[in-house]
Image (cartoon, rainbow, N blue to C red):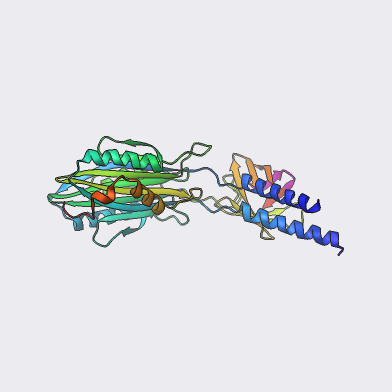
Amino acid sequence: MNPLSRRLVTVSAAMLTCVALLTTRAPAEILIAVGDSITVTNEPVSDCNAKAKTALDSVLQNAGDNGAGVWLAYGPPDSSGHASATAAIHCYPLDNGYNVSFTCAVEVPPNPDTATTLCTKLAAAFPSQKAALVTGQSGW
Amino acid sequence: MKRLRIAAACALVAVAALAFGSPAPAAVQMSTGIRYVIPGGTIADCSGKAKTALSAYLENPVEKTAGGGEWSATGPIGVTGPATAAAVVRCLASSKGYAVTFTCVVQIPGNPYDADALCLDIAHNFSGKPVKPLPTPSPMPTGCTTANLVGSWTSDDKPGLTLQMDANGGLTDSDGVSGNWNLYGSTASLTYYGTHSMTLSPDGKHLRGGGYNFTRKC
């Protein structure tokens, strides 16, 4: 085989490998995460509602509630209008505070984050939670 | 100069592969809002019902922390392959009993029912109310169906070339090179050394166009 032919074979093989690697598609799968459940004392449930909207809008977008303390948002839609991430924050009033819980779901691929990562981001974006919270469900 | 040309060619191939090999669009749909407040119950009661309700529609319900009353499961039940539905049931203890919330997610398209229908049935199963049976996923047609391209295809004019197409829209040729397929009506799109528009014959046996001719084994 002359050098030119050898080079052509090498380049062709490299291109084949490129195509093989780049066109392989993993099947999409739904991942769901049971995020933190946090009891916050000495705060009204309206505090939870405000923080839930803020957290969802900062990580996802267009957070909305159902009027009963359940907040829902989706990730940015792709070019065909489909979102691959979603999360809910439940605010539930207690005698002396409220309980807030996070539930997240993603479709991978294409979403780059796992549902657990999304819930971690949401919990971190729930403002001032670390200063006020008592974790777990005690005190109900 | 030659190296530059080769690099440019590789870049073109990479861009084309990325552009045409991307997954078919799908979305997540979430349902929230169903909440029961049960006076006089315990977390253990709630957990028992939560596990039963999830098991009726999804697989392998797991509790996040033993005794914590937070359950999740994925499914649908009885379907192998990647999960296209999931749900979380949370039991929250109170001094007067407990509250329980239901959150459900489905992938659309790809699931025969929406997230609201799944959540309603799980919640009704939990509370003992009548449930509306959910549509069951149709089994994937096999053989020379016009519903998909799943199967083994042999080239009519390129000796030795065969394509194995799977249920997830992937294909692999006899040399191990992979690609994707999509089917809309009788028009097929193959991403395999570029993107080829092809036509599936009415008997589901022949695929022609874009420089290729294949016959399915069935």
Residue B50 percent location from the top left of the image = 26, 54
* Residue for point 16% across, 55% down: B42
**Nearer to the camera, A96 or A69:** A96
Label tally: 0
Residue A14 percent location from the top left of the image = 71, 58
Residue A21 visible? The answer is: yes
Q: Is residue B206 magenta?
A: yes
A76 in relation to B73, above or below: above
Residue B127 percent location from the top left of the image = 22, 47
Left or right of B19? Residue B39 is: left
Quadrant of the image for the N terminus of chain A? bottom right
Residue A32 percent location from the top left of the image = 38, 52
Q: Is residue B90 magenta?
A: no
* Residue for point 53% across, 37% down: A79
Residue B157 visible? The answer is: no
Left or right of B23? Residue A6 is: right
Left or right of B68? Residue B113 is: right
Q: Which residues are magenta?
A: B204-212
Left or right of A130? Residue B146 is: right
For this orientation, the residue located farthest to the bottom is A1
